[in-house]
Amino acid sequence: MVVDWIGQDEADQIFAALADATRRDILTRVLRQEASVSRLAERYPMSFAAVQKHVAVLERATLVTKERRGREQIVRGDVGTIQAAARLLDEYEEIWRGRIGRIEDLLAEPLPGDVS
């Protein structure tokens, strides 16, 4: 199972981080292009400290990495973590499709006493 690849706790952190719209927006921005925390903070109607906290949640979930360049902290998206989460969701979809396939098979079976 994919959960073994990223671990239950890691999966929980990833999806908890992605549950917030601001964090999803930050992640989208830094996947497109790295940005400093101060540049990110300019885009949101909240304090710099609040944006820092959002970035910290994303960093703990390994969705982003930070690198200090002089006085700035540069944030980058981590595609590997996104891919691991996508594999987990693909596995859930596969399980779901398997259930649908079994339902279709059951519906295709003749009923007892049906002489078609």
Image (tube, rainbow, N blue to C red):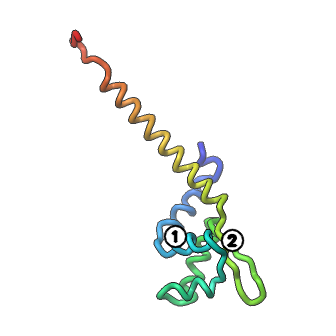
Rendered-image quadrant of the C terminus: top left
Residue 86 horizontal/vertical position (percent): 56, 53
Specify which label sits upstream in the sequence, 2 or 1.
Answer: 1
The front one of 43 and 98 is 43
The residue that mark 2 highlights is 65
In this rendering, position of residue 101 left or right of residue 53: left
Rendered-image quadrant of the N terminus: top right
- The residues bearing labels 2 and 1 have C-alpha atoms spaced at a distance of 15 Å
In this rendering, position of residue 19 left or right of residue 56: left
- Of helix, strand and loop, which one carries label 1? helix
The front one of 16 and 116 is 116
In this rendering, position of residue 38 left or right of residue 50: right
Residue visible at 56% across and 70% down in the picture: 28
The amino acid pointed to by label 1 is: Arg
Residue 13 horizontal/vertical position (percent): 57, 63
Disc 1 crowd, CA 10 A, few/some/many (<14, 14-19, 20+): some
Residue 93 horizontal/vertical position (percent): 47, 44
Q: Is residue 62 above or below residue 68?
A: above
Residue 38 horizontal/vertical position (percent): 62, 87
Residue visible at 63% across and 47% down in the picture: 4
Residue visible at 56% across and 77% down in the picture: 54
Q: Is residue 7 above or below residue 95?
A: below
Do the numbered discs 2 and 1 sit on residues whose CB atoms are within 8 Å? no
The residue that mark 1 highlights is 24
Residue 109 found in image quarter: top left
Residue 51 found in image quarter: bottom right
Tally of numbered discs: 2
Disc 2 crowd, CA 10 A, few/some/many (<14, 14-19, 20+): some
The amino acid pointed to by label 2 is: Thr
